[in-house]
Amino acid sequence: MKPDSYKNKKNHYPVVYLLHGHADYYWGWVTKVPEIKKYADQLQLIIVNPDGGFNSWYFDSPVDSNSQYETHISKEVVNYIDSHYRTIADRKHRAINGLSMVL
């Protein structure tokens, strides 16, 4: 989600990555916190909800080379967001948070 002010081509934004819990999906945050779009506007930031799979636990599996979620999120997703959106592309302007398992 981008803040409404993203239309101003001069602005660059911090990014918050919101991870969903086990057995949930990338839209989990939007479903559980419907006012999240309002937060992007109020806090002037980009919110990214990457898909961590049904039960990846967001780590790189030592036995399944196709299950490399830690690398995917921490490198590939971050690099994609920084290269396709006007972010402030440094550590000081990134945050990550997550939901626990779905009940």
Image (cartoon, rainbow, N blue to C red):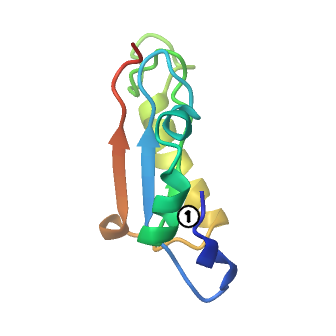
Q: Give x and y (percent) for residue 53.
A: 55, 22
Q: Residue furthest left?
A: 92
At horizontal 49% and vertical 51% (from top left) the residue drawn is: 36
In this rendering, does residue 89 appear at all? no
Mark 1 — residue? Answer: 82
Quarter of the view holding residue 22: top left
Q: Residue at x 50, y 50 (%)?
A: 35
Q: Residues within 10 Å of mark 1 (few under 14, many from 20)?
A: some
In this view of the protein, which residue sits in the foreground, 5 or 65? 5
Q: Position of residue 39 (x, y in %)?
A: 46, 60
22 and 70: which is toward the camera = 22
Quadrant in which the N terminus is drawn: bottom right
The amino acid at mark 1 is Asp
Name the residue furthest bottom.
10
Q: Position of residue 83 (x, y in %)?
A: 62, 65
Q: Is residue 96 left or right of residue 54?
A: left
Question: Horizontally, is 58 left or right of 1 in the view?
Answer: left
Q: Count every numbered label the image shows and give the total.
A: 1
Residue drawn at (69%, 79%) of the image: 7
Query: Residue 23, relative to residue 76: is it above or below?
Result: above
Callout 1 secondary element: helix
- Quadrant of the frame with the C terminus: top left
Across and down, in percent, residue 12 comes to 53, 79
Q: Residue 10, relative to residue 100: is it above or below?
A: below
Image height of 15 relative to 5, above or below: above
Residue 79 position by quadrant: bottom right
| 38 on left or right of 91 | right
